[in-house]
Image (cartoon, rainbow, N blue to C red):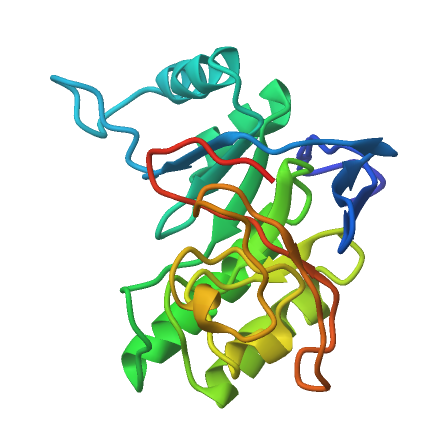
Amino acid sequence: MGGKPVDTSEVLFGIRTVRWDVNTGFWINGQHLKLHGWGQKPVDEWPGLGSAQPDWLHFYTLDLMKNAGANWVRWGHCAGGPAQIESCDRLGLMVQQPGVDGESDSFGAAWTLRSDAFRDAIIYYRNDPSIMIWEGGNYTVTLEHAQELRGFMDEYDPHGGRAYGFRGLNQIDARFIDVCIGTEDAMKLPDCRWSKGNMTGKNRHAGSGMLSRHRILVVLKPWARLMI
């Protein structure tokens, strides 16, 4: 105003290239990488504190995960908070970021709230380089809802180098995903090939017209280490 700034805001960002390959898996900055990590609740409870924590304690929790060998965190079943995502940015931990989900589809005002929350999460966090996957939900939804959720990423984060996935999965939701991240219904899809044991993901091949995108299976089990 009048040639002088009236407000400023500093936004940290990072630059990376990401590729999901149906034959070889995950690549970042030209390097192939195996993913190891946890499904973590955003409350990050600690004994005696619950979720009433300063930001540094969220960083400390994630740093413990990294020192234990993790490079990946899946927040569930709602989005990780600003302190947690910023900590992942600084620590180099990659993130699977959901919106909000009540373990089922929802309708009416409840769906409007969920849909708006996922849209707002994408807009709010789209500059955070740690986020690799936007997770549309923990359980299957209708065709219209699946299309709407996918549309938010395409509209608000089309060039972020991120994939879109659903944990619970069926033939409807599979039409809109880039990577298969499910531990449950995804195993029932006919073109989803699994290795022995449900903690190691193998290639997922888009073999039909309905399943048109290349996908890699990322197995996420709460509180357990994962690997692809």
Which x, y percent locates residue 62?
45, 21
- Which residue is more in the foreground, 18 or 168? 168
Q: Residue at x 45, y 42 (%)?
A: 199
Q: Residue at x 52, y 55 (%)?
A: 181
Question: Is 108 left or right of 73, judged from the image as shown?
Answer: left
Quarter-wise, where is residue 214 in the image?
A: bottom right
Q: Is 200 placed above or below 142 here?
A: above
Q: Is 65 placed above or below 99 here?
A: above
- Which residue is more in the foreground, 4 or 101? 101
Which x, y percent locates residue 175?
62, 79
Position of the C terminus, as image quadrant, is: top right
- Which residue is more in the foreground, 81 or 27? 27
Position of the N terminus, as image quadrant, is: top right
Quarter-wise, where is residue 27 in the image?
A: top right
Numbered circles on residues, count: 0
Which x, y percent locates residue 179?
63, 59
Quarter-wise, where is residue 33 in the image?
A: top right
Q: Residue at x 35, y 52 (%)?
A: 77
* Residue most extreme to the front: 196
Which x, y percent locates residue 109?
30, 81
Question: Is 140 left or right of 192, judged from the image as shown?
Answer: left
Q: Is 93 placed above or below 209 here?
A: above
